[in-house]
Amino acid sequence: MEEGMRRAAGLLSSSSYAVALTGAGVSTESGIPDFRSPGGLWSRYDPSEFATLSSFLENPSRFYQAASEFLSVFTAEPNEGHKALAELEGMGILKAVITQNIDGLHQAAGSKRVVELHGNLRECKCLQCGKVSPIEVLVEKLVQRGELPPYCDSCGGLLKPNVIFFGEQLPRQALEEAFECARRCDLMLVAGSSLVVSPANFLPPLAVEAGAELIIVNEEPTPMDAFASVVIRGKTGKVLPELVRLVKEALKKKNMG
Ligand code: NAD
């Protein structure tokens, strides 16, 4: 691992346009369960009954009952992994964080350019009139008023968190920006993603095909490890701060040399 860490730090410090791609794994150490780890949400809920647009429309109350397990997302704080990525951006190394997460923790940690592929939990949207409101509107109805499911005050339509469900189109602008980053980058750092969700998992092969180095940080193997220049097995909350330390060391050496 030590050797891989040094190699990854060397690649990061000599890159000119590095981008990160993150998944639910970067937020597990903030107390938000991911989907596919042992004990993750998928071990208790069937995604086809829970996170598709058609299942939501068919039975919104069932969705909101399962989603109550996810309420930790509103009180979670960024962890050392989020902070390390923000620091790498501050140092001018990372040019963007593309994330599949909806929890807003990269922004809370100080990352400035965050491309959210799957929407965000800061807002809710009425499926009838399209009105977008702060998520607090939905939470108040759900938690304080016990409205299950919650409906729009303006038109009575069903309210949905402004996140992308399976089977929904991804936000076009975010998708275009992510693909542009993948084509342009000379290094992609993937942290805490199982790399099985499309189209996010098209990004690493696209970057590699365009000549970028790929670094994967994950506790478990991913289907794309074989394409990576370096695979680091470990927790992002530990590995990413250590990478930042090593990058600083490598830059210092470079500047002295
Ligand atoms: P995933 O649940 O499919 O995979 C998580 C990956 O992270 C796994 O490979 C796991 O081994 C790894 N992991 C877990 N904790 C880790 C840690 N501390 N350090 C290193 N690796 C760790 O997540 P995904 O790839 O992001 O795709 C699933 C979908 O889940 C996405 O669409 C995302 O929108 C949604 N999701 C988001 C959140 C969130 O916003 N925090 C939480 C759950 C699910």
Image: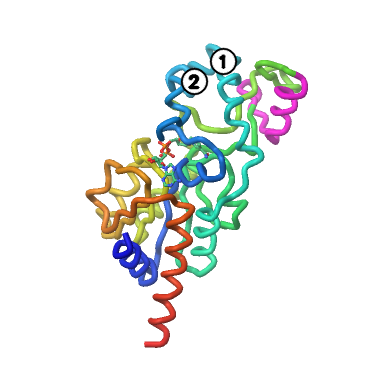
Mark 2 close to ligand 1, CB under 8 Å: no
The circle on residue 50 is: 2
Position above or below: 228 against 76: below
Q: Which residue is mark 1?
A: 62
Residue 132 pos. (x, y %): 66, 33
First of labels 1, 2 by sequence position: 2
Quarter of the view holding residue 1: bottom left
Question: Can you name the residue that lies furthest to the left here?
Answer: 226
Give the SS element for disc 2.
helix
Indicate yes or no whether the magenta region holds residue 129: yes
* Image position of 12 (left or right of 158): left
Quadrant for ligand 1 reads top left
Position above or below: 46 against 205: above
Position above or below: 227 against 139: below
Give the SS element for disc 1.
helix
What residue lies at 51% left-to-right and 63% top-to-bottom?
89
Which quadrant is the C terminus positioned in?
A: bottom left
Question: Can you name the residue that lies furthest to the bottom here?
Answer: 257
Residue 71 pos. (x, y %): 62, 31
